[in-house]
Image (cartoon, coloured by chain):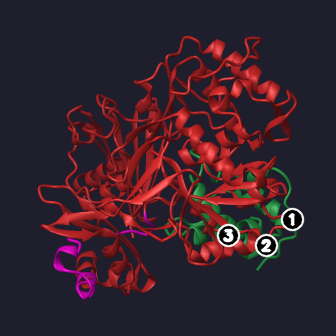
Amino acid sequence: MDDLESELKRLIVSALMLEDLAPEDIGSDEALFGDAGLGLDSIDALELGVAIRKTYGIKIETVSDEVRAHFATVRALAAFIRSNGGNAP
Amino acid sequence: MTPLARLHAAPFLPDQVVAFRGGERLTWGRFKAEVGGAAHELAACRSVALACQDSWRFAVCLFALLSNGASVIVAANTQPETLAALAGEVDRIIDDGFVPSLGEWGMAPVADRMLLQFHTSGSTGAAKRIGRSLAQMDMEIAALESLWGRQLAGAPTLATVPHQHVYGLTFKLLWPLAAGRPFFTRQHDLWEDVLADLPPGAILVTSPSHLTRLGGLEPVAHSPRLVLSAGAPLPEAAAAAARGLLRVPVTEIYGSTETGAVATRTRDGREGAWSALPGYGVRRDGAGLLELDAFGQTVTLADRIDLEADGRFHLRGRADRIAKIEGKRIDLDDVERILGALEGVESASVLVLEGHQPALAAVVVPSDAGREHLDRLGAFRFSRLLRKAAAAGLEPAGLPRRWRFVETMPMATMGKRRARDMAALFEDAPRLPPVSALRSTGADDVEIDLQLDPDLFWFQGHFPGHPILPGVVQVDWALHFARTELMLDLPAAREFQIKFKAVMTAGDTPTLILRHDRAKGRLTFEYRDRAIRYSSGTVYLS
């Protein structure tokens, strides 16, 4: 699997304190929010935003439209971080 | 400024932009045409619950229905439980699926005695319905406009809070509409999302939920003209962080669902007293409570205040946070403060459980060190340790009798604690449903057919007339049957996830499917009835 994607899954589990969920239990294309997938809520989204900014140093000026779509799945997040020149820790 | 009741006659040009939806600019001419079309289509509705999440659609339907003289309930959210509870009371629930045709009928005036009805959880946890008249909201909006109108002319409004609550409805939707300022039709949830869309000189309507989660953001290039926060007090650290990043001090709004906005203060780093809105009178009554003169009436709020000589005031906690325990007056805020300062406690919340005798109960999030104690000592001994430590600062009646330890405090949107969820943590004797059949499908699997009799405890009182089985009870039942049928030795659940697909109500006959996954240390459960999947979830057994 993609390294950045595995790393993001570990970040999701640790940042949101999903203690009993293994990173590999999160599918790369599984919906992170809403009823269908992992079921994260809007507060989780805010926390995840903080974790991603702190880890990858994404600059907000570079963000384009439809940011929410980038947070839909782990795969989309990974693509978003790469395209914004995010630095792996 | 046009009163809402006479919005149809507002002096805006037809091509004036009212709202932004994605890249689309929605104009005043379109608004009037959609309101006219919607009013025509909804002419037969006498009572409606509005559940539109698109703010434009919400506004169109709201003015159409009010001009028809229909009664409007603002659905607090679009959860299935909420909508199911409303379904029996109204002719129709309108959501974003309703697309009005553009009418040649035009927009009609509204009687300003028309009421908008809101739901609030209320501090006691029981759902309350509160009506506010259009006339009241017009007076509130006129006061806001006299305070800020000049500096905000033309500024677009963007919100992280829903328009379904009084704060969002006024600040994100109705005030901009009346003042001819454009708003974004959707709610922005992520900061990345907010900052990508935030135009220079905008009005940002937000809350402590967002302002306490600014970590990792860069200062913005164009600061907003006004950043508003309401719903719960904003911690000083968050106010300072927001000031640095957004380059403008946060303006806090104090108010209630009953009154709308009442007072405001600027979080510029100095200890700030609250100033009432222009034209509003604030007094301290004999019991120390805030007495408000506004809208031609006097209302007493549940907050205690101290007045300054210049008429500004300080909030001193909620009056309904004073409980009578063992005959003693106990200030729950004091108890919370003392528990929160104890070693081993990250945060604490205190509530009164009404039983044959009111009892003080504490919900505690342990710190890392506290978590170690908890794991080593168990919940009861750890709670006794905390009681002993708290006894230094509290009289015996102020020491909580019952304790629950949780990972995070149950919070509703905008940072308010959910009283009902808190109380649910202490429901230790849930009434169980009759079992009509039980099939063991393996050593670690069982299927149990349940009958949800209408006389179950859980169907009394939550939503009168619309009994729904609460989520916490569904988890509790899964745990109960895991103990009795799968012989699992379970502690009280600390962590679980549950997904709701459909609501369970009295008379339903769901099958509870339980599976114990030993390898992963979790219990999964599902409530279903043939093709209907009600809910499913996981309880983590550590």
Occupied quadrant, residue B58: top right
Letter of the green chain: A
Question: Helix, strand or loop at disc 2?
Answer: loop
Q: Is residue B528 left or right of residue A69?
A: left
Residue type marked 2: Glu
The picture places residue A52, in percent across and down from the top left corner, at 71, 69
| Both marks 3 and 1 on one chain | no
How far apart are labels 2 and 3 at the CA level? 9 Å
Please rate how many residues cluster around mark 1, counting C-alpha atoms within 10 Å: few if below 14, some from 14 to 19, many from 20.
some
**Residue under numbered circle 1:** A61
Residue at 27 percent of width and 87 percent of height? B389
Q: Nearer the viewer, residue B106 or B437?
A: B106
**Residue under numbered circle 2:** B218
Q: Is residue B142 left or right of residue B166?
A: right
- Count up the numbered dots: 3
Q: Is residue B92 left or right of residue B427?
A: right
Name the disc covering residue B112, or none.
none
Occupied quadrant, residue B112: top right
Question: Helix, strand or loop at disc 3?
Answer: loop
Letter of the red chain: B
Q: Nearer the viewer, residue A58 or B528?
A: A58
Q: Are marks 2 and 1 in contact (CB under 8 Å)?
A: yes
Residue at 60 percent of width and 77 percent of height? B237
